[in-house]
Image (tube, grey):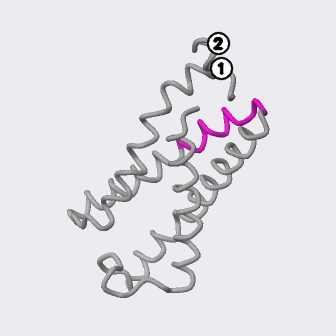
Amino acid sequence: MTKLLKLLMVITDAGFLIYWLVTWLHLVPDEYLYKDYDNEIMMAWNVSFMPLDLLISFTGLSSMYLYTKNKRQWLPLCIISLSLTFCSGLQAIAFWAVRLDLDWFWWGPNLFLMLYPLLFLPALIKNMQGKAPLEQRNPQ
């Protein structure tokens, strides 16, 4: 596994945890909140991502921990985490696109969530299927 993947996963997974802590403590200034933030339906839409985002963090951070312990279970957890990360970004981008609401403050991070997993998933899936060269199968 590349250092870049480890770095991006830890930043992303910790970022989700920080985002939800900041959200629940209402620490984001009003000028940075998304359009119609005070709308009850919009708040429910945002909070509906919390279980998914927390699952992403759990699987991602668990996979990194197992990787450092040289446990083979890191790979399926990593693939699950990256797949869910892609889905989280895709759902948010689809929502903002349907609303025709182009705010790069919100689109940027969600495009990142959608696109960065695609850099790594094909190789990780090949690795999981045993089709990668032997030197790539070992987490070391």
Quadrant in which residue 78 is drawn: top right
Q: Decide whether residue 80 is among the magenta residues.
A: yes
Q: Is residue 111 left or right of residue 13?
A: left
Q: Which residue in the protein does label 1 denote?
A: 137
State which quarter of the image contains the C terminus: top right
Residue 50: x %, y % from top left: 57, 65
Does 72 appear above or below 7?
above
Does 45 appear above or below 57?
below
Q: Which residues are magenta?
A: 71-83
Compare residues 72 and 52 and report the one nearer the observer. 72
Main secondary structure of the magenta stretch: helix
Q: How many marks?
A: 2
Amino acid under label 1? Arg
Q: Which residue in the protein does label 2 denote?
A: 134
Residue 122: x %, y % from top left: 48, 26
Q: Is residue 6 left or right of residue 96?
A: right
Q: Decide whether residue 110 is among the magenta residues.
A: no
Quadrant in which residue 69 is drawn: top right
